Amino acid sequence: MKSNDHIENFVFDLDETLYSPKVPIMKIVGDKINEFMHKYLHMKEEEIPIKRNYYKSTYGTTLYGLMKEFNIDPEEFLLYVHNIDYKKVIKKDIELKCELSKLKGKFFIYTNASKNHAKCVLEQLGVEEYFENIISIEDTDYIPKPSIEGFHKFVDKVGINCKKSVFIENSSVNLHTAKLIDMQTAIVWDKYINCKDFDYYLETIYNLDILVK
C-alpha cells in the first residue's frame, strides 16, 4: 500500500538498481571476491561458494564475514574486488538522467559497496551530479544492509525524515529493513516477488515517474 506522505528524499541502492542486472559488474566483483578468498585466505575453490553463502546469510556480506572470522583489512579487500575497468562494462545512460530529472527532492546512494566504486559507477552512468551524498560501506563502519544497525547509521549520516523518504532497491530483504524504520519502499527489476509487500513496483529503473504519480 502506498503511503500518503509526500516523498522528499529518494534513497537509491547502487548495483543492479541504477543499472540493469544484465550489466556484468556484480559478476566481475563476485569473481574477484572468489580470487581474494583463494589467493589470500587459501580457501579451496570448491568451498568458496558455500562460505560466501554462509557469510551473506550470517553477516550480510562476504566482507563483513571475513572481517569477523579472519580479521581481514576491509580497505585491502575493497580495493581488490573493485579493481574494475568501468569504461568497458557500463555506459552513459541518458534515459536514466531523464528519469531522475522527473523527481523533485534530495537524492542519496546507500550501498554495501565502496565509496570509490559508487563514484565510478555514477560517473560512468553520467548521473553523479544528481546525488547529494553517497553513504558507502565505509560510512557505516562496514555494517552492511540488511542490518537495521546499518540503516540507522545511514539515517544518522544524512539526517532525513524516514517517513518522507523512499528506498529504491532490487533486494527485497533490504527493503524489508527499510520498512522497519518507516521508509517507503520501491522494488525494482525483480519480477518474481510479491510486489504487494512494497509501496511501489518499478519494472525497470526507467519507471521512476511512478513515484510521483
Image (cartoon, rainbow, N blue to C red):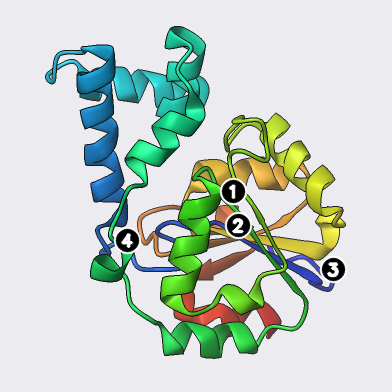
The answer to whether 108 is drawn above or below residue 38 in the figure is below
Whether residue 61 appears in this view of the structure is no
Q: Residues within 10 Å of mark 2 (few under 14, many from 20)?
A: some
Which residue is rendered at x = 41% and y = 20% of the image?
55
Residue that label 4 marks: 21
Which residue is under mark 2? 198
Q: Residue 88, labelled with which disc?
A: none
Q: Nearer the viewer, residue 95 or 115?
A: 115
Instruction: Please indicate, yes or no, whether residue 78 appears anywhere in the rendered image.
Output: yes
Q: Are marks 2 and 1 in contact (CB under 8 Å)?
A: yes
Amino acid type of the residue tagged 1 in the rendering: Leu
Residue 98 or 137: which is nearer the viewer? 137
Residue 100 x %, y %: 59, 82
- State left or right for residue 183 relative to residue 27: right
Q: Which mark is residue 175?
A: 1
- Spatial CA distance of label 4 from label 2 is 20 Å
Labels 1 and 4: the sequence-earlier one: 4
Please give the count of numbered marks on the rendered protein. 4
Callout 4–callout 2 Cβ contact below 8 Å: no
